[in-house]
Image (tube, helix red, strand yellow):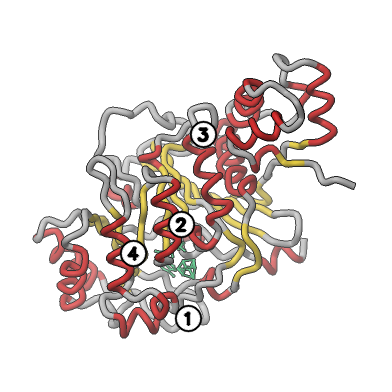
Amino acid sequence: MNEKTDLKNLTLPTLELFLKGRGKERFRATQIFKWIFQHDVDTFEEMTNISKELRRELAETACISNLEPETVEQGSDGTRKYLFSLGDGNGVEAVLIPIEGRNTLCISSQAGCAMGCEFCLTGTFKLTRNLTTAEIVNQIMAVERDLVKNPPLLLADPGAAGLIADDSDEGDDDQGGAAGIRNIVMMGMGEPLHNLDNVIPAIQIMIDGNGLQFSNRRVTVSTCGLVPEMERLGREIPNVNLAVSLNATTDELRDRIMPVNRRYPLKELLKACRDFPKPGRRKITFEYVMLGGLNDSLADAKRLLKLISDIPNKVNLIPFNEHEGCDFKSPTQAAIDAFHKYLIDRHVTVITRDSRGGDISAACGQLKGKLEKLESI
Ligand code: SAH
Ligand code: SF4
């Protein structure tokens, strides 16, 4: 039996090819694409401007998938964590962070992660599998649906805007809508650049004017530093934002805490950052997880500045979130402040991420997957 094609896996050009291959007019693709991604229908019956015959034919060969959150937890700060069951025993999480009515959604790209960073909980799960394009965009669509039903608290807390999204650029404040999701960051479970075959079409659907209609300035992909894949991403989607998890300022330490560094050491990684397309005044975000007593000294801050100073940059300091079975320590507040001040005083744009969602362990990079829990459902 032929498997039905899940149309949520298809970008608009691919949907056009899909229809063309079945002898249909190409313009139908735009209509169907809008029904799926803008009107969020899940049956072909609802596509009223499509002929009955085509609707019937589509229902035989294609389907429209959906994700429903298994659980939604809300933290005291308004952060919401969604746990999605993927139907095969795997689970992934997405985290919504409302900041003054501007919602940032952190989504997952893989179940588990193969990169094995020593400080990361997702890494300890190893890679179970890649998410499909549909599973990536369905996280966004499910959260949008939840936001309509349960509008989030509006928090007057600009300090928390640290979650990457660059709100400094003006002029498109309508994008994403105050009630809906404004920014997408691929900083949940998994290494997005280890799943580019599915992540690239997902981003194309996110930024398509006929699709989810996000401004490309509001979509950020975070990587641990897979150099060839950074090049591919830059070639295929040159206007997406890139965040790089640097986390160490010497190869010696980076080799130890991020195995990927043994393949692509700092020099190569920074060259790839330099070469990455940066349209307009776009900058690369360097994420820096501060590990108490390990990479949080002023000497580190100084080396960090030197490493990134010839790349348009901003820095996102993330105090390490302690978790069981991991010996690293959070930095002291004094170390965070001194590191932050060192960079600010030298005119670096720095944001220190607070531990949003701490009470529901929803902080990005802290996503648990709760695989055990899902298996028992
Ligand atoms: N794989 C990608 C994106 C997911 S990880 C990447 O590594 O960039 C998202 C961010 O969370 C990364 O910057 C990572 O360094 C950080 N992170 C992982 N575990 C963490 C922890 N326990 N505390 C704080 N940040 C963490
Ligand atoms: Fe994977 Fe990112 Fe965690 Fe490293 S920090 S193990 S790349 S999710």
* Mark toward the viewer: 4 or 2: 2
Assign a secondary structure to mark 3.
loop
- Give the residue pinned by disc 1: 326
- Give the residue pinned by disc 4: 318
Q: Are marks 3 and 4 in contact (CB under 8 Å)?
A: no
| Residue 56, placed above or below residue 358 | above
Residue flagged by tag 4: what amino acid is it?
Ile
Residue flagged by tag 2: what amino acid is it?
Met
| Residue 50 image position (x, y, % from top left) | 73, 17
Classed neighbour count for the residue bearing mark 1: other residues with Cα under 10 Å, few (<14), some (14–19), many (≥20): few
- Give the residue pinned by disc 3: 151
**Label 3 residue near ligand 1, CB within 8 Å:** no
**Label 4 residue near ligand 1, CB within 8 Å:** yes
**Label 2 residue near ligand 1, CB within 8 Å:** yes
Mark with earlier residue (1, 2): 2
* Mark toward the viewer: 1 or 2: 2
Assign a secondary structure to mark 4.
strand
* Distance CA(mark 4)–CA(mark 2): 13 Å
- Give the residue pinned by disc 2: 187
**In this view of the protein, which residue sits in the foreground, 373 or 258?**
258
